[in-house]
Image: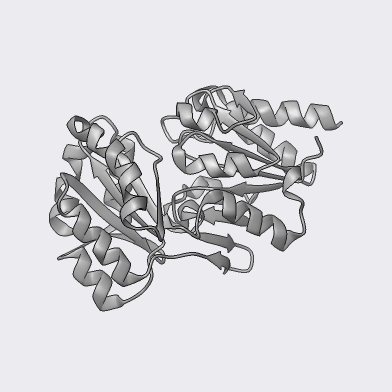
């Protein structure tokens, strides 16, 4: 396979469980870049939420953010594409979530926002995931009431997220299916064991990958994608070669062309080296 572009999720995929970049992954990314392959982080995060050490590598120009709600050119510091949730619709979703035993927040622009009492309650929802709690606490600005904030600012949102306690994970599964039924303009996916991520139906990592390939004049069949979460499934289906991590959700594995080693065993790097060897 002739590879021109490699897209990869970060958490649970490129990064290990401690949010570190394994040495083999770094070496493989550098080798791919030297071979002229474009490297595209495709994440549920926003720019401000990226680990600084990844940006300092200088290996990435294009990014897929917020599950495909934004395609961004870092070199020119501009959006190539966006697909956001209208404020009025976002408030309706928040009103639905108010009836559930959850916390919720949103991404808008360069940061996240969360109602103050939910921000304060976050430690109860991430008892076993201190890295996620740290991200939530550092990247969300607490506001008195998120719905009021959304309406007053009247700016479209890249993403809504909700979080469940361990004892409510059955309800999480129900809501994953229910959200798109109640709000056909939206899609629901997940990247954590206890979350749901809500985007515009025009977003999605797969759609964003296709749009980026089109903008760059690259046939998508020359693309490779790596992922582990439900928010990666579409991207794996649309890439020329979809690679699911060993630690991926079963539904994601069913979307992939190949299963690679886990994120803790540098599965991304190992597969990139295998692909580079085949093209030599």
Q: Residue at x 16, y 38 (%)?
A: 124
Query: At which x and y percent is residue 240?
Result: 71, 40
Whether residue 125 is visible: yes
Viewer-side residue, 184 vs 40: 184
Q: Position of residue 145 (x, y in %)?
A: 16, 65
The residue at the far right in this view is 280
Whether residue 114 can be seen here: no
- Counting from the top left corner in percent of width and height, residue 10 is at 50, 41
Report the front residue among 151 and 72: 151
Identity of the residue drawn at 34% across and 58% down: 183
Q: Quadrant of residue 113?
A: bottom left
Asked which quadrant contains residue 85, the reply is: bottom left
Q: Nearer the viewer, residue 160 or 186?
A: 186
Q: Is residue 220 left or right of residue 125?
A: right
Which residue is nearer to you in this view: 181 or 195? Answer: 181
The residue positioned 87% from the left and 31% from the top of the image is 280
State the scheme by which the image is colored: one colour
Question: With respect to residue 55, does 241 lie above or below?
Answer: above
The relative height of residue 21 versus residue 40 in the rendered view (above or below) is above
Residue that sits furthest to the front in the current view? 181
Which residue is drawn at the image coordinates 80% and 34% (left, top)? 1
């Amino acid at each position: 396979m002739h590879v021109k572009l490699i897209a990869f999720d970060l958490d649970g995929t490129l990064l290990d469980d401690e949010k570190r970049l394994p040495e083999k992954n770094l070496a493989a990314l550098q080798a791919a870049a030297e071979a002229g392959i474009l490297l595209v982080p495709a994440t549920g995060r926003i720019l401000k939420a990226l680990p600084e050490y990844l940006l300092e590598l200088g290996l990435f120009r294009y990014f897929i953010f917020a599950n495909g709600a934004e395609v961004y050119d870092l070199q020119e510091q501009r959006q190539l594409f966006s697909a956001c949730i209208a404020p009025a619709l976002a408030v309706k979703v928040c009103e639905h979530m108010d009836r559930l035993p959850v916390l919720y927040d949103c991404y808008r622009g360069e940061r996240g926002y969360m109602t103050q009492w939910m921000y304060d309650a976050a430690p109860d929802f991430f008892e076993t995931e201190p890295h996620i709690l740290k991200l939530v606490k550092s990247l969300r600005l607490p506001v008195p009431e998120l719905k009021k904030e959304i309406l007053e600012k009247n700016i479209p949102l890249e993403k809504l997220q909700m979080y469940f306690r361990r004892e409510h994970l059955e309800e999480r599964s129900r809501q994953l299916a229910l959200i798109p039924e109640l709000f056909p303009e939206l899609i629901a996916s997940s990247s954590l064991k206890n979350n749901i991520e809500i985007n515009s139906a025009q977003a999605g990592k797969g759609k964003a990958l296709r749009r980026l390939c089109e903008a760059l004049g690259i046939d998508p069949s020359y693309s490779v994608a790596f992922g582990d979460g439900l928010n990666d499934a579409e991207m794996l289906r649309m890439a020329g070669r979809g690679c699911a991590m060993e630690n991926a959700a079963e539904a994601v594995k069913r979307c992939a062309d190949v299963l690679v080693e886990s994120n803790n065993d540098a599965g991304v790097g190992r597969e990139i080296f295998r692909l580079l060897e085949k093209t030599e």
